[in-house]
Amino acid sequence: MLAELSNRLQRLAAAGLPSQSGGGPVAWPFSSAVVRIGVTGLSRAGKTAFLTSVAAGLLARRFALAPVGASEVPVFDQARHLASLAADPPSWPERTNAVSLLALTARVPRGVLPARQLRLEFLDYPGEWLIDLPMLRQPFASWSAATLRRLAAPETAGMAGPFLAFLDGVPAKAAGDEALAHAGARLYRELLGRLRDRGLAFLQPGRHLMPAPGPEPPWLAFFPFAGAGALQALLASRYDAYVEAVRRDLASPLFADVDRLVILADVLSALHAGSAAFADMRAALGAASGSLRWTFSWLEAASALATLRLPPRVITRVAFAATKADHVADRQRGNLAALMGALTPVPGAGVKTGHFAIASVRCTEDFVWTLDGRPVSAVRGRVLGQQVMTRSYPGEVPDRVPEADFWEHPFLALPDFEPMRLEGGGRTGVPNIGVGHLLDFLLDDVL
Ligand SMILES: Nc1nc2c(ncn2[C@@H]2O[C@H](COP(=O)(O)OP(=O)(O)O)[C@@H](O)[C@H]2O)c(=O)[nH]1
Ligand SMILES: [Mg+2]
């Protein structure tokens, strides 16, 4: 316990740097420091591509992959992901699930002081799990009411048919029957999967879509229900257990030690998916950003003291990044970053916030395309499995949340581009847009 406490104290002192003073270099008394960066975003937002590119870039400088010790989090498989990108023809890293950890170290020179051992830990954390944050402040009854209200909206009501029909057949005072609970949970989970495939993002509970590793706990078998009998009580108790697990997760060293955060979102695909999906992504980003405000209650602070553990560190820097920005030309990327800014809530004072448009793994080059006699800034690249170059101009990226008339002209689908060929197996890094800029923002005080 004491060793753990002193360990955490040392980490706090060494790495929990800027915030209060508004940033700026801090004199570090210790000869080693650990900085943990959470990288989050919904499935397909581009987390794996981002981490692969970041790691390749840092490895090409003075960093080395570090052992992760006795960590219980699976290791981010950098070598395999980079090998996919370096293959001929290049392919995208395989889909990954749940959490993983990438650790890198370097000796950082410090002028007259002795060089310091810096350890960067990047935590690949599913955004689906952060979308559960608002549930922490909602009892089962109000969560159910809000969720059922959203499902009844015209955009989703059609897809929700089987689940809503099931609910219609269940009496409000139904008995707490296990088979019924499971049938409802299964229908609800299938519905969440369909809504996700439609491009919707604000889907709770997130662990239905992105289960934690290991056997499924029985309390996952719940669904929104507005009744008032034994079934309602059973579902409510499961909901409470679920929320408790979310709370534990956030307070665990895994997430609680994160002091910087990168939130990735595929904003361009949301523009293509249409206004409902776009509004939904905005709600999801708002929910996930709740983690920035995550602070311990007094009760938790007291119990932290009692167990000699420090309350979690506060997140001091956050980068919101729109990914896959190589789908639009350079001229549009400023708008994309501005749009990302318009979509994300302003965190509290003391949090340094930046908005970016990045491509972790660049696939295209810019070129001027003459469409209907008018020159437009477009991009071209090789589509997966094809030999010829494909041109693409999905549309004009708005620099703010679009007005209703924007949706009258569809924003086109993004082609599945193949990554650019890597030189030397990626040993000199991965061609990208804006990743270095983002890292400077995130780590300029420690690098
Ligand atoms: N054009 C382009 N596509 C990207 C980029 N990053 C990711 N993608 C695409 O998005 C998919 C999902 O990315 P991935 O990193 O696996 O997302 P994750 O589920 O958040 O880990 C990839 O397979 C690519 O097709 C990028 O920088 N440019
Ligand atoms: Mg992944």
Image (cartoon, rainbow, N blue to C red):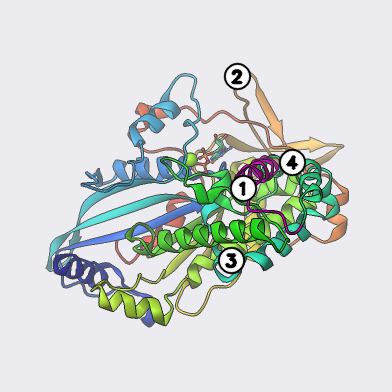
Question: Does the magenta stretch mainly form a helix, a strand or a loop?
Answer: helix
Real-space Cα distance between discs 2 and 3? 42 Å
Q: Secondary structure at mark 4?
A: loop
Real-space Cα distance between discs 4 and 3? 34 Å
In the rendering, which numbered label is found on residue 428?
none
In the image: residue 60, left or right of residue 197: left
Above or below: residue 145 compared with residue 412: below
Q: Nearer the viewer, mark 2 or mark 3?
A: 3
Real-space Cα distance between discs 2 and 4? 21 Å
Mark 1 residue's CB less than 8 Å from ligand 1: yes
Name the foreground residue: 109 vs 223.
Answer: 223
How packed is label 1: few (under 14 Cα within 10 Å), some, or many (20 or more)?
many
How packed is label 3: few (under 14 Cα within 10 Å), some, or many (20 or more)?
some
Q: Which of the image's four quarters has the C terminus? A: bottom left
Whether pointer 1 and pointer 4 mark residues with C-beta atoms closer than 8 Å, the reply is no
Which quarter holds ligand 1? Answer: top right
Q: Nearer the viewer, mark 4 or mark 3?
A: 3
Q: What residue did someone put label 4 on?
A: 394
Q: Secondary structure at mark 2?
A: loop
Whether pointer 4 and pointer 3 mark residues with C-beta atoms closer than 8 Å, the reply is no
Q: What residue did someone put label 2 on?
A: 385
Real-space Cα distance between discs 1 and 4? 14 Å
Q: Position of residue 171 (x, y in %)?
A: 77, 54
